[in-house]
Image (cartoon, grey):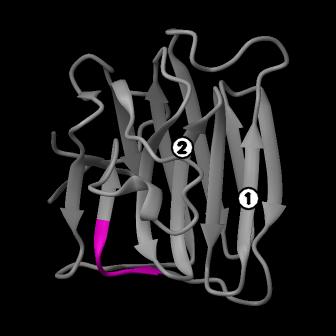
């Protein structure tokens, strides 16, 4: 279940509101009683890791999903609203994001327009395909991994995330 919060203009204390993953565990929210049906979304998170690859979050199935991962030290986002995937890779100019420093990621979607920024500097904007504008998910919302990460639709990685992660989705903070 989610604990609702007003959206602050800054992160809460990371130390008090984060989960640390070791690669075999993950958080799973069952959405069957409270499905996601949205035309706009905002995902805000912070992470730090040495790991090059790992699933940060995933929700949805077949052709209606959001997948955010660390792939080869870059942040990978794949969103499909039912008519083809929008894919974005954000890489730093020098080095990688798996440098064990905190990195802030923000993903916003309004209808078909998607923007992802990392550390408030590196930004990519694009559009999902065709005319579909609704994200619908009534199965599970995974954070930090899943039982079978390689089999998730749109997943560019096969392993779960490791190290600390702080996440907000649509202004709701998961109650770790």
Question: Horizontally, is 118 left or right of 98 in the view?
Answer: right
Residue 81 position, x and y percent, is: 61, 80
**Relative height, residue 164 to residue 171 (above, below):** above
Q: How far apart are marks 1 and 2 (CA)?
A: 11 Å
Q: Is residue 21 magenta?
A: no
What residue appears at the point 77 percent right and 22 percent down from the top-left corner? 92
Magenta: main secondary structure equals strand
Determine which residue is flagged by label 1. 87
Q: 30 and 23: which one is in front?
A: 23
Q: Name the residue under label 2.
A: 69
Query: Residue 23, percent across and down?
Result: 30, 32
Give SS at disc 2: strand
**Residue 163 image position (x, y, % from top left):** 34, 21
Q: Identify which residue, 21 or 81, lies in the foreground.
A: 21
**Residue 78 as seen in the image, left or right of residue 37:** right
The quadrant in which the N terminus is found is bottom left
Classify 10 Å Cα crowding around label 1: few (below 14), some (14-19), many (20 and above).
some
Residue 164 in sight from this viewpoint: yes
**Label 1 SS:** strand
Residues in magenta?
A: 136-140
Instruction: Kindly identify the residue that appears in the image at 50 percent across and 50 percent down.
Output: 43
Q: Write down the quadrant of residue 28 in the picture.
A: bottom left
Q: For this view, does 97 lie left or right of residue 123?
A: left
The quarter of the image holding the C terminus is top left
Earlier residue among tags 1 and 2: 2
């Amino acid at each position: 279940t989610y604990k609702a919060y007003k959206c602050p203009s800054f992160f809460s204390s990371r130390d008090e509101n984060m989960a640390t993953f070791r690669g075999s565990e993950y958080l799973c929210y069952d959405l069957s009683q409270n499905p996601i049906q949205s035309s706009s979304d905002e995902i805000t998170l912070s992470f730090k890791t040495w790991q090059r690859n790992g699933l940060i979050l995933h929700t949805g199935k077949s052709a209606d999903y959001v997948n955010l991962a660390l792939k080869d030290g870059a942040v990978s986002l794949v969103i499909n609203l039912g008519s083809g995937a929008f894919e974005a890779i954000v890489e730093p100019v020098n080095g990688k994001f798996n440098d064990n420093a905190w990195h802030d990621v923000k993903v916003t979607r309004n209808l078909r327009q998607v923007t992802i920024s990392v550390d408030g500097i590196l930004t990519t904007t694009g559009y999902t395909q065709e005319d579909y504008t609704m994200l619908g998910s009534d199965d599970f919302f995974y954070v930090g991994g899943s039982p079978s990460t390689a089999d998730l639709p749109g997943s560019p990685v096969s392993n779960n995330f490791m190290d600390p992660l702080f996440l907000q989705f649509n202004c709701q903070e998961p109650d770790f």
